[in-house]
Structures are given as structure tokens and as C-alpha cells.
Amino acid sequence: MNFEITPLTLAGACQDKSDALIVLVSEGFLAGKDALSLLIAHALEAKDLELKAGKILAAYRVPGIHSPKIWLVGCAQGTPVQVKTTLSAVMPAIKSAQSKKLTVVFASAPQTPAVQAAILTVAEASYVYTTTQSKPVGRSLSLLKLGVPNLSPVVQKTFDIATAMAMGIEVAKEWANRPANHATPTLLGEAAKALSKAAKFSCEVLGPKEVDKLGMGSFMSVAKGSREPLRFIVMKYQGAAKTQAPVVLVGKGITFDTGGISIKPAAEMDEMKFDMSGAASVLGVFKSLSLLKPAINVVGLIPACENMPDGLAVKPGDVVTSMSGQTIEILNTDAEGRLVLCDALTYAERFKPKAVIDIATLTGACVVALGAVRSGLFATDDGLAHALEKAGDQAMDLCWRMPLDEDYADALKSNFADVANVGGRAGGAVTAAKFLQRFAKAFAWAHLDIAGTAWKGGAAKGATGRPVGLLMHYLLSHESAHQNEVSPSSRKVKSDAD
């Protein structure tokens, strides 16, 4: 899908020739003399249009307005959340009408974050997965034009970031939605290489021999039961001087998780294709970086493999040696995510990072604690935690900080190794984070447990692309102020993620 932003008043919107026109009407609306203003004013006076977020009034072929299909929608004070609610309510009608060109115009000057909300909501609502369908019917919408009364540099910058985020989110969705046989570790490596072809990017994909040389015994133990060879993917983006310490993102890449010998129940096991959503989010972030090219350095690490119950698979009670030299007693083979992440965290030390953030669909316990609204956030550094919380708020990709009290580590004690990989049901999300913390003492570290937010089940089954938005806002907060200047001119952006 293509995105465009342009200065557009209601009078200008009357001349717009898109297939469909959505007008966001907020409190304080002042009518002009154009056809759209008069239509809105009459509808408000007759109380056929309410300004409560999500209230919709449809019109068709109104004299003086070129777009044949018109939706007037109330968005209250026009906050980002209200704009999201409003557009989410009207987009099913746009999708049903098979509109190809859509214009969304703000009747009044919008709050700047509302511009981001509009772009992300339309992109989300129009997204369609087609990769493995024999007769795919993709999204009908090919162009979203966003009209604002005044196009300031700040609004333009917001538009640029939002469109890049939307494209990154769709890359993350694409790879998380693919069935495991279409998203193997090898294919993830190829996807990473494809994303790293641009200037300032590089990618290295390590196989079993290289990983063995590194001493990643914990990671290798998870892959033993699968015929699909593991891959350790190292992506780099250098947008700043080499002397600037990078942020390292570590994405859990379990491309399918049966639970191994501690096998999962059959019901809903198909959803374990989403267990590489952390890895997919790293791919999505690198897509967004390729479009924005900010003045920062970022490293992406993806330990990718399957967790299968083969005769060679690791067994409950086995003890393995991690890259750090710490030994691990594997009490439950279904707690495999932390086993691949711990070696990746040790590997991250070589980059002398500013911060390391791992992203993982790690625990069902986090789903119980926070549901599907907020991702779980664990951090050893208060500044890092606050920055991630702020980024989540800005992206409407929310997280919630969880505790890391040392007392929780007692549950991981083992009689046969330095640490056990599970600590029982109580506080399961916390003990999983405490396990990872043992391997993250050399840098500021945060862990995002996205088990409840990475995908939706039921009739709406599919990946959400979270937390690409959160991560992008966090990364961009590091960019130098002088590189935040943008041109106020209209800009078009084309997505190749369709």
C-alpha cells in the first residue's frame, strides 16, 4: 500500500477524486462555506452525526463533493486513541466496498500523534495475508492519502515515521503469519539478508558448525530434535559513527514449538508458528530502519530453530553448557525460548552495547498476568525501562514493568547444574526473566514478554506486528536532534510489503 500526506482543507477535499472519503470531525469544528462543511454542519444540527468517537454517518454522491462515497465520523477531542477507535469503526465498510484509493481528512488541525494513529489504524484494518493461498485476494486498498489543514515539518516527520512503522509491522506480520514450513530458520536467514542489502546494512547467517564453535550449547540443545538446521542471524545497521555504541535487539526465533519431549497439548498447537514473533519483530524493525535511515547503530540477533520431539531431542533432566560457561538443568523442554536467548545475550556482549532488549513470546504466565493489552517489561536499568514505557505510550503499543526481585531466583536453584530452566508455576513470567538476567549482567538489559500481544486467536487469528512500533519509537529517541529536521513538502512512500 502507498501512503501520501498533503495539505488539504475541507474545501480542497471536496475536489478530491478518491474512491472513498473519510472526514474526521472533532469537537470545536468550525464550518466553512464548502459542501463538506455544510454537510457536517447540517448533520450535527440534525443530530444525525455525533462527535462521540466511533459514531458514523455515511453519504453517497453528495453534490459538490467529487468522492462518491463519504463517511463522516466523530472523533471527540481527536486524541490518538479516539482516532484509532473512530477509524477502526469505519474501516470494515471501506474494506467491504473494495475501495482502492482512500482519503482521510481531518476537519480540524489534528494532534500530531493522531496522524500516526490514523496511518497505523488504516494499515492494520486493510492488511490481508495471502502468501500461502492458492487464489489470493489481497488488500484492495492501494493508496491512503492523509489530508491535514496545515502540513508542518513536525507533522511531516510524524508521517514519515508512521509509514515506516506501518511497513515494518507488516513485515513482522508476514513472517509471523507464515506456517512453519514456509518460515524455517533457513528462510528467516534469507529474509534477513534480503532486508540487509541496502547501504549501511549488513547480515551474517551462522549455521550449526559456526554456532558449535561459539560454544552455544544451550541454543544447540533446543535444535537437536529437528531436521531443520538452526540459524543464528546477525543483522547490523550502522547509521552513526562506529564509535557510537549500538542498541542490540534479540528476537526469539522458534519457528515452531511442539514443546519438545515435554510436548504441548494438541489443541491450538498450530498457533506455535507464532513462537518466532520476537524474531519477526526484529525483521520488521530493520525494514523500518531501511526506510528512515536514522543516525543510530542497531544490531539484531535472531537465534532461530525448531523445538521438536525427535529421538535426539534434549530430555528433561539433561544438563547443557551455555556460551557463558554456566550449566543449565533442563527440567522442562517446553521452556526452550530462554535456552536460545541466553546464548544470544552472551553473544551480544561483544558489541559493547548501549542497551540490549530481547523480545520473546516467552511465557503463558505473562498472558495470565497482562492479557493481550500490554506486553510484559522487565529491566535492570530504570532509565531503559522508563524509555521503553514512554515509547510504548507513543506507539500505542503498551507495556507494563514487572518485578525482578532477587528472591524470585530461588525457584531456579538446581542440585545438578548452576541453574534450572524453570522454577514452577508461581511467578512464571518473572522466573523466566530472572533466568535471562543471569546472562545479561554486562550491559543495561530489558526483556519484553510478548506472549499475550504478538498474535490474536479465534476468528481474528493472526499476528499483530507488536512490538515493532514500541521498538522504533525507542530507537528513534536516540537519534541526534540535528537529524530530526524534515522537509515540509508532500511526500509519497511506497510499500513493498504487499
Image: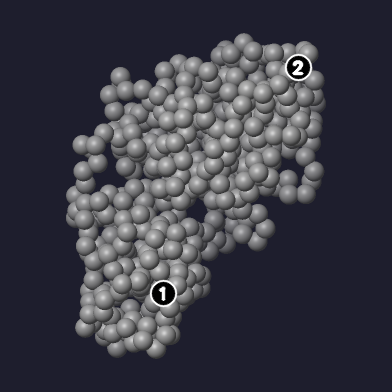
Q: Earlier in the sequence, mark 1 or mark 2?
A: 1
Q: Quadrant of residue 237?
A: top left
The amino acid marked with disc number 2 is Ser
Identify the image quadrant of the C terminus.
Answer: bottom left
- Quarter of the image where one finds residue 193: top left
Q: Is residue 377 left or right of residue 202?
A: right
Q: Could you say which is closer to the camera, residue 148 or residue 5?
A: 148
Identify the image quadrant of the N terminus: bottom left
Q: Residue at x 66, y 37 (%)?
A: 363
Callout 2 environment at 10 Å: few (<14), some (14 to 19), or many (20+)? some
Q: Residue 51, which numbered label?
A: 1
Where does the image place residue 410, in percent across and percent down from the top left?
71, 21
User: Dot 2 corresponds to which residue?
Assistant: 414
Residue at 76%, 30% in the rendered image: 424
Task: Answer with left or right where residue 225 lies relative to residue 338.
Answer: right
Decide: is 456 above or below 294: below
Which residue is painted at 59% across and 32% down in the image?
A: 403
**Relative image position of residue 66 (x, y in whole percent):** 29, 80
Res. 477 in view: yes
In the image shown, does 72 or 228 lie closer to the viewer? 72
